[in-house]
Amino acid sequence: MACIEARGLRKAFGANVALDGLDLRVEEGRILGLIGPNGAGKTTALNAILGLTPYQGELKVLGRDPWRERNQLMRDVCFIADVAVLPRWIRVSHLLDFVGGVHPRFDRAKAEGFLDRTSIRQGSKVKDLSKGMVAQLHLALVMAIDARLLVLDEPTLGLDILYRKQFYDSLLTDYFDRSRSIVVTTHQVEEIEHVLTDLMFINRGRVVLECSMEEFESRYAELTVKPEHAAAARALKPMHERQVFGRSILLFDGVARSKLAALGEVRTPSIADLFVAVMGNQAGQAQGAAQ
Amino acid sequence: MNTQANPMPQSPVDSRESAPAVMRPMRPMYWSIRREFWEYRVIYLAPLAIAGMVLFGFMVSTLTLPYRMRTFDPEQLRATMLQPYQLGATLILGSAFVIGIFYCLDALHGERRDRSILFWKSLPVSDFTTVFAKACIAGAVLPMLGLVITIATLLIMLLLNSVVLLVNGLSVGPLWEQVPVLRISLILFYHFLTAHMLWYAPFYGWMLLVSGWAKRVAFLWAALPPFAICVVEKFAFKTSHFANLLLYRLNGPQNFDLTTAHGNQVIPLTQLALLKFLSTPGLWTGLALAAVFLFAAAWQRRYRGPI
């Protein structure tokens, strides 16, 4: 059974279409990075998956309709929507009490174990913790819940690099296993690159690119072309070209690396580079259509 | 290249099956109510503070009691002896009522303002449980706390009074006769049950609904629509049915109020008064209205996110 299955997901706020027929499928045991520019519909898509907003179209999360069966779904789904949503007035120990009291799958000892590795004390109130510590605390809570799907919406926004790195490291080493699924959105694409198993770009409420990371590596290649081969390289129809220090860097989709190797230096592009290429093309097309 | 090859020691599928999948249904309710005490400590601190002030003022006034007992005639004495008890009870219960209003208006608003609604909604606690827990605080826990604190305060007052009298070699008989704490407690309990819990329920429901709905100034949104209806009705039809209806509700349950019973006379049988109260149509329409408001508050919380 797919963990998340969406077909033709639509959601409009007045005239503003946030989701325009989104198709999405996440299998069990995957870590999907949902990446898109601001206003692309990422948060709306996640809210629909979490049953926080009504939608049109077909959507099943762990076999349930998230809007209608939200209460049951929340036993198996966890989410961190944004940084610092923990109530500021609560004491850490009370937070553990509460989650332990209402969540049948919460393992308090595990959460305390995670907290012991940080400098968060149980007597502290959330408002006395730094932003990074609040994120650590929230992650400790979430990781101690034996959920089947974890949704993270910009969970590290505004944190410094140490906290960000630690956040994803502990997620991988202490939490993730093959029976769980994670969906994550972030603007700090470079940092989650090594974490993901699947990648999806969305823009204007639609999926513009979807592939597994294995596919990503075999499909996309970045060529720093030697000046004398520039024309030959361009003949292979790169999807994007940019200039760095006077040298042309071309991004290819589905061109054999052996072919490219003769023309210059070949690398696997970063997700950020591919993102810029795909979104840049989209913007170009939109402008073309407008003219 | 992916580093997810860190399988958990035991298969999580197995551990999941062994984990209790269902909880006792009252547990989320219980914890939701406890949670309110952590967030709104004013719920118990304010009545306690008022009780403390009442006790302090009373202690000062007892110093002159022996003098009054010697010089006042019995009728005067009765009035001056009973008065602080009545005033103290009114103050503490009144403070609990006022706190209830402010609590209701903030209860579903605060979580949106500080964005914590996103956290609460990530837990398996239904919107109805959350709303109902808050309604319980306003309609039952808070008045009950007020009641318990009041009765405790009255007992302490009586004790203080007695000590002062005994020390001055006076008899405590008249005092205990004039200030029947047990009977007052019964009256207060009856008042709590009829007025605060049942009769005012639609007010709590309405304020909770508004607090979840209004983006700001929840107090104004709660007060303005009823006021507007009154004004429009007055100008359009020259009547004030709605205003009368509000006043009828605000005045509390009428014609079976035990608190009107005075002095040494035997109070009307509680049972009789209670039956009369339960057969008032106004009680049941009020409760139905409260239920509608609470369901509406729970329903709209589903659509609500941070402000």
Image: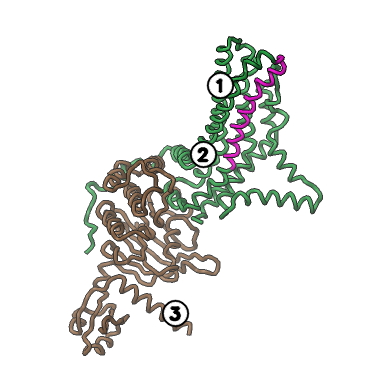
Quadrant location of the N terminus of chain A in the rendered image: bottom left
Image height check: is B211 above or below A48?
above
Image height check: is A127 above or below B43?
below
Residue B279 occupies quadrant = top right
As drawn, which residue projects farthest toward the right? B238
Other residues around mark 3 within 10 Å, as few (<14) / some (14–19) / many (≥20) = few
Asked whether A166 or B122 is in front, the reply is A166
- What kind of residue is marked 1? Leu
Q: Colour of chain B?
A: green
Residue A169 part of the magenta segment: no
- Element at label 3: helix
Magenta highlight: main SS = helix
Q: Which residues fall within the magenta stretch?
A: B72-101
Q: Colour of chain A?
A: brown
Image height check: is B251 above or below A3?
above
Which residue is tagged 2? B42
Residue A88 visible in the picture: yes
Which residue is tagged 3? A286
Chain to which mark 2 belongs: B
Residue B281 occupies quadrant = top right
Other residues around mark 1 within 10 Å, as few (<14) / some (14–19) / many (≥20) = some
Left or right position of B227 against B116: right
Whole-number angstrom distance, CA of label 1 to CA of label 3: 79 Å
Number of numbered discs overlaid on the protein picture? 3
